[in-house]
Image (cartoon, helix red, strand yellow):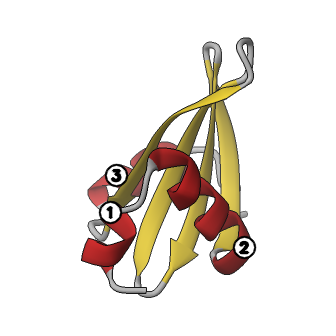
Amino acid sequence: MLIHAFLSLAIFERAEYVRRNGVYLIGRLEGIFLYKLFEMDGYFIEIKINYKEDHIEAVNTFQDNIRLSPYLEIIDIF
């Protein structure tokens, strides 16, 4: 799916599409939020979940490496 078509979906439709079609890469906790990072069709998708209230707060897309920094910090390469 092209990015503009993906972004036209409602937040819950985006999250479901990513769960079915994306490649899960890594997750991280920050406060009450669980972030799940996926790769799909050449871009990254981050699903932000409020795990205390059990709902999706945001589904963000990006292609730049700068937004990967929080995930790279938790990967142990050695």
The numbered dot on residue 66 is: none
Q: Amino acid at mark 2?
A: Arg
Q: Residue 78: x and y, percent?
A: 72, 63
Tell me if residue 40 comes above or below residue 52 in the rendering: below
Q: Which residue is mark 3?
A: 67
For label 3, the SS is helix
Q: CA distance from mark 3 to mark 2?
A: 23 Å
Q: Position of residue 19 (x, y in %)?
A: 70, 65
Q: Residue at x 69, y 47 (%)?
A: 27
Note whether residue 77 is visible. Answer: no
Badge 2 crowding class, 10 Å Cα cut-off, few under 14, some 14 to 19, many 20 or more, is: few
**Distance of mark 1 from mark 2, alpha carbons?**
16 Å
- Residue 74 picture quarter: top right
| Label 1 element class | helix
For numbered disc 2, what is the local secondary structure?
Answer: helix
Which image quadrant is residue 26 in?
bottom right
How far apart marks 1 and 3 lie (CA) works out to: 18 Å
Which of 54 and 68 lies nearest the eye of the viewer? 54
Q: Nearer the viewer, mark 3 or mark 2?
A: 2
Q: Which residue is mark 2?
A: 20
